[in-house]
Image (cartoon, coloured by chain):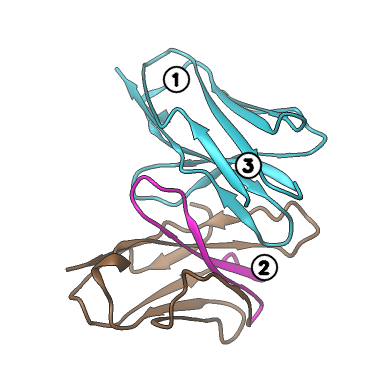
Chain colours: A cyan, B brown
Amino acid sequence: KNQVEQSPQSLIILEGKNCTLQCNYTVSPFSNLRWYKQDTGRGPVSLTIMTFSENTKSNGRYTATLDADTKQSSLHITASQLSDSASYICVVSAGYSTLTFGKGTMLLVSP
Amino acid sequence: DTGVSQNPRHKITKRGQNVTFRCDPISEHNRLYWYRQTLGQGPEFLTYFQNEAQLEKSRLLSDRFSAERPKGSFSTLEIQRTEQGDSAMYLCASSLPQGGNNEQFFGPGTRLTVL
């Protein structure tokens, strides 16, 4: 069964600090891995997409890594801002239309 | 704003009533997806269309749920005889055909509350 596990479930950090969110997956066949940011009451917005051959990708203060051998990904947020408070969802594509979503990590950035 | 719009944004209804939601995808996207998301969970796949054809339906899509995309553009999701367990955020997404990275762009969602 395809699964995506995220940790931690929730996280509180002080504004300006860095943090790293984890994603482990068992999805086959692997097509790509995405990280989405979802503000409360809004739809998810894509941050990064990585294919099998990519092991790091940045989008501003967000840097995602992918280790296809261990089936792990991380999302690192640098110099956090209050607006980073959101749920971060790891999504793995098995090709065609099939996406497997993690439950998300709820991040709260405190002033 | 991703370019995908959904209406209404919020719907409160009484148990047993029917509700209908609308999704307008990005115009050049021929794939359209519906998801359901409950609090603290990731989105769960319900169904998807390629143009007007409904190609896949999840087991979550009970007989009370029906989705249409009659002209291959906007789509509607209808829930008949709503139950309290139907309370959730209903998300729509669209994408270009397979061949790219199949990135899905999500709408803002419709929050359904069944009393």
Q: Quote the CA–CA distance across marks 3 and 1.
A: 20 Å
In terms of image quadrants, where is residue A83?
A: top left
Q: Is residue A5 above or below residue A76?
A: below
How far across and how far down the image is residue B72, in percent? 62, 80
In terms of image quadrants, where is residue B91?
A: bottom left
Q: Is residue B108 left or right of residue B105?
A: left
Q: Chain of mark 1?
A: A
Q: Which residue is rendered at x = 26% and y = 73% of the image?
A: B83
Of tags 2 and 1, which is closer to the observer? 1
Q: Which residue is rendered at x = 68% and y = 46% of the image?
A: A27
Q: Would residue B36 be counted in the magenta stretch? A: yes
- Kind of residue sitting beneath label 1: Ser
Mark 1 element type: loop
- Kind of residue sitting beneath label 3: Arg
Does mark 3 fall on the same chain as mark 2?
Answer: no
How far across and how far down the image is residue A17, in percent? 44, 12
**Residue located beneath label 2 in the image:** B28
Mark 3 element type: strand
Q: Is residue B47 left or right of residue B5?
A: right
